[in-house]
Image (spheres, rainbow, N blue to C red):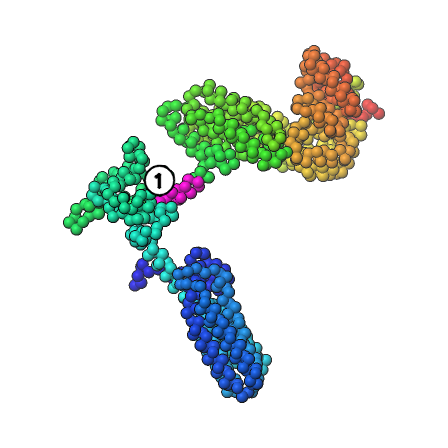
Amino acid sequence: MPDASSPSLPAIPTAALLGLRDGPDAAAWARIRAGLIFAGRQFALFLLAANLIGAAIVTMLFAHLVPLPLLGGWAGATAAIAVGIAVRRLRGTARLDGYATVEELRGTAWEGLVLALAWSAAPLLFGDTGDLIATLGLWGVLAVLMTGAAMAMAPLLLSTLSLLGAVTIATVVPLALRDGHVAAAAATLFAMLLAVAAITRARTLAQVRAAALSLSDRDATVSLLLGEFAEDGTGDGASDGAGWLWETDAARRIVRASPRFALACGIDPAAIDGQPFLQLLAGPAWDSGAFSSGLRQVAERMKNRQGFRDIALPIVVQRQERWWTLTASPRIDADGHFCGFRGVGTDITEQRASADRIHRMARFDALTGLPNRQHVTETLTEALAAAEKWKARCTFMMIDLDRFKAINDTLGHPVGDRLLGMVSQRLGALMSENELVGRLGGDEFAVVVRDGDQAVRTERLAHTIIHTLSQPYELDEHMLYIGASVGIATSPRDGRTADALVRSADLALYRSKDRGGGVVQAYEPQLHAQAEERRLLELALREALEKGELHLHYQPVVEAATGALCGFEALLRWQHPTLGLVPPAKFIPIAQETRLIGPIGEWVVRTACAEAARWPAALRLSINVSAEQLHHPQFVAVLASALSNSGLAPARLDLEVTESVYRTEGTGTARVLDGVRHLGVGLCLDDFGTGPSALGYLGTARFSAIKIDRSFVCKASEGAAEAIAIVRAVVALAGSLGMATVAEGVETDDELHTVRTLGCSHVQGHYFGRPLPVEEARTLAMRTATRAA
């Protein structure tokens, strides 16, 4: 049975053995290559003698058959090459215990190639003499040399294979040309066998060398643990993470301290013996009694005369904190009496620092330095456990930045990243010991309030966060403005687990964003029901288009002065088989967030165009288009296809857009709108005045009409001076720019009279007709055409 302690021979990659690439363990292979080169040098004189004797034999065999100058020149060149190779090897710096690079091993191939060139010339120069004995003698010399090379040069495998290959080619080719195919095949087989033998021998040598190195490394490790290395005083201290032996007597005083241990402690080896071991470990903390938990464990085990293993503790060495691990067992003399401890210490400062860095990378956000999602979740879990234990409450806030995406899109992600860093600094400055702020990802942050019993204080903190984050940021000569929305959930009312509380805060944040952002929203139970309803609506909406549940209604648009029908606005409706008629205010936002607005919007455009093409040519069609649709570069192609397939004239179509399409720059919206105008389709600005920078949009975009929001119409009819002034200004502005004005939501005589008086050119609302099903809208359109005729 083999000894279990003996190492198994490692696998040797052929490419590494040849020197074509490095081995799997670069350090080990550098030593293996040095051993191979050293072994090759050991056979340098043997190889020299073989070449000189071989050259002499060939010279004697062909002395009477070949001109002496030619023969002498070949013999002299071969001898010179052999001597040069021997000298090169003997002068080499390779040592058995040294290191060699891949290039050094690969460079030995030139020796085999040059030597092969010399011996390959022999059969080519002297093979046609016709003397059978001389020829057979030459083949014999070559065979012996090849065999000797396969054995003596095997450690340098690339050199050996180069020699065997070149000589074989020089031998086989002439035989094949003289129809000596059998001899050529035999010579090839012989060379292949030698090559296999050389490879096997080289691999064996490398395996033996690798095993010897492994044993040597193990011996060195054992010697280190036994303190042998330290006795020569050449140790470089504890900075390299190596270990040292320590020993105490029964009174726990240091005895027979090795120089390496003394150096690790930063104490003169002559003064360390006799010092109390625990006092040495405690350092400055010995007088104060502020001992580390690791030192307390060591003291307890030594007091009880128990062994211990890998106890980590901090040590102060020359005013610098380092970390050691200690392992020890009690010493018992021949009579069974306790006489102290003997153990091993290891400096793990670098390993611990590396572990701390990895731990920090795993728990802290690399961009902002704040705790990451994992750390926040762990803190929340701990806070929930503490709150449940003390019958208290903890609070979780989710924070989302408003308008941050616009900055990323316009100024680029590097600026956005730096802005996130500034946001993180502001958030960190607001936190006390009771709170922890972290980054969940993107522009989402979270705050864990460990003690959430004071709801008023928590809400005040949330408002402070919004106010602080809404202050301007100066970055790269840009003055940036963003905001924040906050959702709050409190345990145990809103959730007893971390996942439940995060979900509740997320729902509250969602409601905060729905309210326009910049507000604090606490979780309410109905938010969960609304979220579930939203989820079900999303699932149903994904199938609504395929099942034919979507349809269009058309609301009349009339001339304000005469009340004559001039067109319709297409309005999307969803009739679900079980939910009934779902309001557009519910399903349109879902369609936009889930990217379903693309296929739904295309269906609306194609269906509405096909219907409008059947109306009289005087009637126009208006279709609402979302910002998400205009962000898609293929929208113009879809619109052109719908117009072409339906036959509707582009001039009869108006696309209604809101000011929100201009709030996100860099999305290609401007190019899409230019493409729409180039088709001849009109643009109508919907809900004018309800968003920011409306006048700026009017100055840059060529709209054909402006729609005045119903809120202004109602207030103007009630006599509100501000609303009247706004409507009058819009009408005047539209008139100066050649645009029509459409008053939305007109439902009473007073409202109609007001918008007529203020000069609106068109009117839309329930006063003239509610949104009609397609058949009724078509009938109304035909009736209007008949009256006009």
Q: Which residues are magenta?
A: 347-358
> In the rendered structure, does residue 355 fall within the stretch colored magenta?
yes
- Horizontal relation, residue 96 to residue 182: left or right: left
Report the front residue among 33 and 237: 237
Report the front residue among 740 and 323: 323
> In the rendered structure, does residue 436 fall within the stretch colored magenta?
no
The answer to whether 339 is drawn above or below residue 704 in the figure is: below
- x and y percentages locating residue 583 in the rendered image: 61, 26
Q: What residue appears at the point 75 percent right and 19 percent down from the top-left corner?
A: 731
Q: Secondary structure at mark 1?
A: loop
Q: What residue appears at the point 68 percent right and 27 percent down from the top-left corner?
A: 658
- x and y percentages locating residue 414 in the rendered image: 58, 36
Q: What residue appears at the point 40 percent right and 44 percent down from the top-left corner?
A: 350
Q: Identify the residue under disc 1.
A: 318
- x and y percentages locating residue 616 in the rendered image: 79, 29
- x and y percentages locating residue 713 in the rendered image: 70, 17
The answer to whether 350 is drawn above or below residue 509 in the figure is: below
- The answer to whether residue 27 is visible is yes
The three-letter amino acid code for the residue at tag 1 is Gln
The single residue placed furthest to the left in the displayed view is: 335
- The answer to whether residue 491 is visible is no
Q: Quadrant of residue 480?
A: top right
Q: Quadrant of residue 50?
A: bottom left
The single residue placed furthest to the right in the displayed view is: 789
Report the front residue among 651 and 204: 204
- Horizontal relation, residue 607 to residue 369: left or right: right
* The C terminus, quarter of image: top right
SS majority, magenta = helix
The answer to whether 88 is drawn above or below residue 345 in the figure is: below
Q: Quadrant of residue 300?
A: top left
